[in-house]
């Protein structure tokens, strides 16, 4: 069954129900639909048949080959940074537009969509909670698709009760920390779509209180350096 993005119903919902309108609304949704139908959707069944390959020797994960070209085109098209402020390499468009296009992407291939989707979550977390130096260093690379992002939240013993986490952060000087612990369910935690991956890791600084009030978030690149 071929995926067909619901452009008309989405336009109706945004314009007539939610009273959201923008000169770029229809052309953006039309182009997003075309990309999802022609580039992403065909990877759905192919990706399931191929699967990812995990090397026990070096820990590397190879995604289905059919994921590579659509990701490159998606990144080059500026879709990841659609609603990211222009000062950080995005297009500065309303977040509502990004939500609508994200729906098309996830519907055309949920597995593929996690790579840019979790990256957008990491971008938003940095924009809200990061300092200016962190935003300038990482957000443009994430928005351009040069890097991807993850969120390393839960652990084997705690499930959704993040207050029970045991991952520890020890101050190492110069605003850096040593992070030790174990995380599970990290979507996009390792892959070959990009050379670097920025992990946003929840951990507790030594001496901070128990429970959720003592949790901090740390930006941990797969590889150190720009």
Image: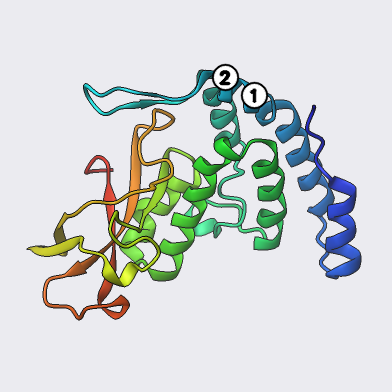
Task: Tell me if mark 2 has few (under 14), some (14-19) or many (20+) residues whose alpha carbon lies within 10 angstroms of its own.
Answer: few
Report x, y in % for residue 97.
71, 56
Q: Which residue is mark 2?
A: 49
Report x, y in % for residue 223.
24, 40
Could you say which is closer to the camera, residue 207 or residue 155?
155
Question: Distance of mark 1 from mark 2, alpha carbons?
Answer: 6 Å
Q: Secondary structure at mark 1?
A: helix
Residue at image point 54% right, 26% down:
67
On screen, residue 89 above or below 69: below
Q: Which mark is residue 45?
A: 1
Q: Secondary structure at mark 2?
A: helix
Would residue 60 be found to the left or right of residue 62 on screen? left
Residue at image point 30% right, 27% down:
60
User: Which residue of the protein is positioned furthest toward the front in this rendering?
Assistant: 157
On screen, residue 225 above or below 126: above
Would residue 74 be found to the left or right of residue 108 on screen? left
Looking at the rendering, in which quadrant would you find the C terminus? top left
Report x, y in % for residue 153.
35, 58
Residue at image point 20% right, 81% down:
209
Q: Are marks 1 and 2 in contact (CB under 8 Å)?
A: yes
Looking at the rendering, in which quadrant would you find the N terminus? top right
């Amino acid at each position: 069954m071929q995926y067909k993005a619901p452009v008309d119903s989405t336009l109706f919902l945004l314009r007539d129900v939610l009273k959201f309108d923008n000169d770029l609304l229809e052309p953006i949704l039309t182009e997003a639909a075309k990309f999802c139908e022609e580039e992403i959707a065909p990877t759905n069944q192919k990706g399931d048949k191929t699967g990812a390959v995990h090397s026990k020797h070096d820990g590397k994960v190879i995604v289905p080959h059919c994921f590579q070209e659509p990701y490159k085109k998606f990144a080059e098209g500026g879709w990841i940074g659609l609603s990211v402020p222009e000062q950080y390499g995005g297009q500065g468009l309303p977040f509502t537009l990004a939500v609508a296009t994200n729906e098309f992407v996830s519907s055309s291939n949920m597995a593929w969509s996690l790579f840019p989707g979790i990256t957008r979550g990491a971008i938003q977390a940095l924009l809200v909670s990061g300092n200016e130096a962190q935003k300038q260093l990482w957000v443009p690379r994430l928005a351009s698709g040069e890097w991807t992002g993850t969120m390393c939240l839960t652990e084997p013993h705690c499930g959704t009760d993040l207050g029970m986490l045991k991952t520890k952060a020890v101050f190492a000087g110069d605003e850096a920390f040593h992070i030790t612990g174990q995380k599970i369910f990290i979507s996009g935690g390792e892959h070959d779509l990009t050379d670097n991956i920025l992990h946003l890791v929840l951990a507790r600084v030594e001496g901070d209180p128990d429970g959720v009030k003592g949790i901090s978030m740390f930006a941990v690149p797969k590889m150190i350096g720009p």
